[in-house]
Image (cartoon, coloured by chain):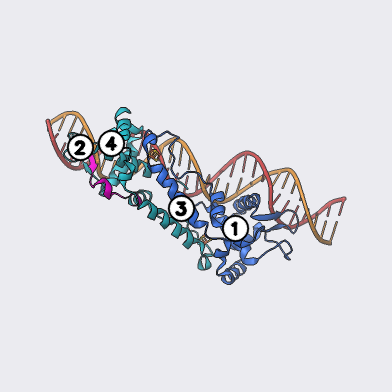
Chain colours: A cyan, B blue, C orange, D red
Amino acid sequence: MQLKKYTDYGLRILMYLGAHETHADAPKLTTIRDICETFGLSANHVNKVVHHLGRLQLIETRRGKNGGFFLAKAPGEITLDYVIRQLEGDEPWIECHNPYCVALPACELNGIVARGKELFYEYLAQFTLNDLLKKQGQLRQIFSTTP
Amino acid sequence: MQLKKYTDYGLRILMYLGAHETHADAPKLTTIRDICETFGLSANHVNKVVHHLGRLQLIETRRGKNGGFFLAKAPGEITLDYVIRQLEGDEPWIECHNPYCVALPACELNGIVARGKELFYEYLAQFTLNDLLKKQGQLRQIFSTTP
DNA sequence: TCAAAGATACATGAATAATGCACTTTATCA
DNA sequence: TGATAAAGTGCATTATTCATGTATCTTTGA
Ligand code: SF4
Ligand code: SF4
C-alpha cells in the first residue's frame, strides 16, 4: 500500500517546472537530463513519466535540439488528484474477481473501501500544484544547487 | 496501489466467523481448512493470517484436536480501520527517504498524502465487522453451500 | 548534415507478495 | 497412552509488479 515511485517522480517533475516557471518562451526548456541530475534518477524512468505527463497535457514536450518541456497549464489548474489518479492508475483498491471471490454477491467491504478511496482523492482534489510551491524560493534554491 | 490479498483474506475470515457466530462454546470451531475450502485459498497463507488475527486478539485460536478459532470480540467492536491498518501495515504511502529526496526540506506533498491516508482510515473507522454482516443470511448461505 | 533532444520497444534486474513444504507443538479422544 | 487433528514456526520457492537498462528511431534546430 504505497504510491509508485513513478507517480512521485511525476509530481517532482511538476514541482521542478513550477519552481522554475519555465514557459514556451523561456530561454531554456527543462530537459529530462536536468530532472535526472537534480533528483539523481534514472533517465529512462523519467523519460516515461515525462512522456506520460505530455500525453495528459499537463506539460508540453518539444523534441529536437533545444527541446525539453514546460508546464502546459497554470499551476493552479493542476489538481493533485488528477495527477495521482492518472499516473498511479486508478484500479480498485481491492480485487474481487481474478480470482472470483464467493462472498462478492453479499459483500459490503468492497463498496466501503471504494468509497474510502474516493474520499482520499476528493481530499487531494482540494490541492493544486500551487500548494506544492508554497516554499517556491527554497525549492528553486534546492533545485539550482543540486546538480 | 492496492490492498494485499493478505489483508482481504483477514477480512474474509472475520466475515466468515461473523456470519457463523462461532463462539468458544459452539459445537464446532471454524478451522483453517474450513476457510480454505470455502474461499479456495492456500492453507499456508490463511494459516499466517489466522495467526496474525490471533496475535491482534481479534480472534481466539485453539490448538489441538477439535481446535480452531472464533471471534474474540463482538463484531460491533471490530473496526475496519484497525484490521486493515494492522494487516496491511501502515507505512507512509510515499517514501521520501530511501533514497533521500532532495526536495524533502521544502516539500508539501508528503504531508498532504499523509493526511489523505488518515482520512481514508478515519472513514474506515466508522465501520465495524457488523457493517460487513448486513446480508448475514446470504453470507451464511454462500459459505455453507460452497465446500 | 550533425547533434541534441524526446519517443518507442524490448530486455533485464530488484523488490515484494503469494504460495509451498517440512516440521514442531499442543490438545483431545479413543 | 498413543493416534490424530488442529494451529505454530521457519525457510524455500514462485509469481507479480515495479524499477531500471539498452538500443534504436524520430524530430528539430543550428
Ligand atoms: S471479501 Fe468482499 S471485498 Fe474481499 S474479495 Fe470477496 S467480495 Fe471482494
Ligand atoms: S517530492 Fe516530496 S513527497 Fe516526493 S519524495 Fe520528495 S519529499 Fe517526498
The kind of residue on which mark 2 rests is Gly
Instruction: Determine the residue positioned at 47% across, 48% down.
Output: A1
Could you tell me how far apart the alpha carbons at marks 1 and 4 are, in whole angstroms? 49 Å
Chain containing mark 1: B
Pointer 2 or 4: first along the chain: 4
Q: Nearer the viewer, residue A70 or B82?
A: B82
SS assignment at label 1 = loop
Q: Earlier in the sequence, mark 3 or mark 1?
A: 1
Are labels 2 and 4 on one chain? yes
Q: Which residue is mark 4?
A: A32
**Which range of residues does the magenta coloring cover?**
A67-81
Q: Is residue D10 left or right of residue A138?
A: right
Q: Which mark is residue B119?
A: 3
Q: Which residue is mark 2?
A: A67
Mark 2 → mark 3, Cα distance in angstroms: 41 Å
Mark 4 closeness class: few <14, some 14–19, many ≥20 residues within 10 Å: many
What kind of residue is marked 1?
Ile
Query: Tags 1 and 4 in contact by the CB under 8 Å rule?
Result: no
> Chain ID for label 4?
A
Q: Are marks 4 and 3 on the same chain?
A: no
Return the residue nearer the eye: A123 or B147: A123
C-alpha distance separating marks 4 and 3: 35 Å
Q: Amino acid at mark 4?
A: Ile
Decide which of B16, B121 is in the foreground and name it: B121
Give the residue type at disc 3.
Leu
Q: Which mark is residue B53?
A: none
Position of B58 with respect to C7 (left or right) is right
* Quarter where residue B130 is shown: bottom right
**Distance of label 3 from label 1 (alpha carbons):** 19 Å
